[in-house]
């Protein structure tokens, strides 16, 4: 393993710029998602909900194939009242009795309730990681030296 001199071409520089822009978009998106989650955690009340039923609907996908999707009916308690709302439609049916985390605005729990994605913290971490990898990879294209594994020696 060794480093060897490298002359950047126009294509290298262009792809590095595009990569930097894409990486920065990933990182900015990671900050946006992180701030959105932090805002929800600060302003909404979090409680435990219970899947009490599910509803289904049939719809056509992009290939005009008929598919059935399911949405859980979730119940939780807010202000000593039982509140029910319908979650998002998915390709799978949630089992009755499943516990989920619910967030809602204290003044309007009926209309603002939402199911918390259990992986919500990983989304921003993944965006930061992808952005960082793309930026490092892009910068590697324009560095004046490149790393070589030393496979075959260049005898020119």
Image: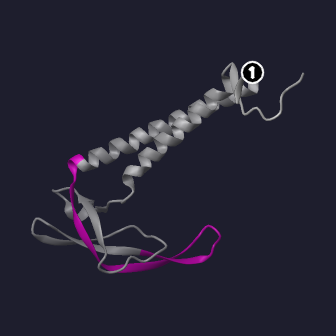
- Residue 66 visible in image: yes
Horizontal side, residue 156 vs residue 132: left or right? right
Above or below: residue 1 compared with residue 108: above
Packing grade of label 1 (10 A; few <14, some 14-19, many >=20) is few
Question: Magenta stretch mostly in which secondary structure?
Answer: strand
Foreground: 132 or 62?
132
Q: Which residues are magenta?
A: 42-70
Q: Quadrant of residue 112?
A: bottom left
Q: Position of residue 61 (x, y in %)?
A: 58, 70
Residue 93 pos. (x, y %): 42, 77
Element carrying mark 1: loop
Residue 24's place in the image compared with 43, above or below, is above
Q: Position of residue 60 (x, y in %)?
A: 57, 73
- Asked whether residue 57 is drawn in magenta, I would say yes
For the C terminus, the image quarter is top right
Kindly identify the residue that appears in the image at 47 percent across and 37 percent down.
Answer: 27
Q: Which residue corresponds to mark 1?
A: 6
Between residue 25 and residue 81, name the one nearer to us. 25
Counting from the top left corner in percent of width and height, residue 7 is at: 76, 19
Image quarter in which the N terminus is found: top right
The answer to if 99 sits in the magenta stretch is no
Task: State left or right for residue 139 relative to residue 92.
Answer: right
């Amino acid at each position: 393993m060794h480093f060897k001199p490298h002359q950047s071409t126009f294509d290298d520089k262009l792809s590095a710029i595009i990569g930097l822009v894409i990486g920065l978009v990933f990182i900015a998106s990671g900050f946006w998602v992180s701030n959105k989650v932090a805002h929800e955690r600060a302003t909404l009340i979090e409680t435990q909900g219970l899947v009490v039923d599910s509803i289904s609907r049939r719809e056509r996908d992009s290939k005009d194939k008929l598919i059935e999707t399911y949405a859980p009916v979730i119940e939780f308690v807010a202000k000593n009242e039982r509140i029910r709302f319908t979650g998002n439609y998915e390709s799978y049916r949630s089992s009755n009795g499943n516990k989920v985390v619910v967030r809602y605005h204290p003044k309007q729990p009926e209309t603002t309730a939402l199911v918390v994605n259990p992986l919500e913290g990983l989304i921003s971490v993944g965006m930061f990681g992808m952005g960082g990898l793309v930026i490092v990879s892009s910068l590697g294209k324009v560095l004046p030296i490149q790393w070589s594994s030393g496979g075959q020696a260049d005898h020119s």
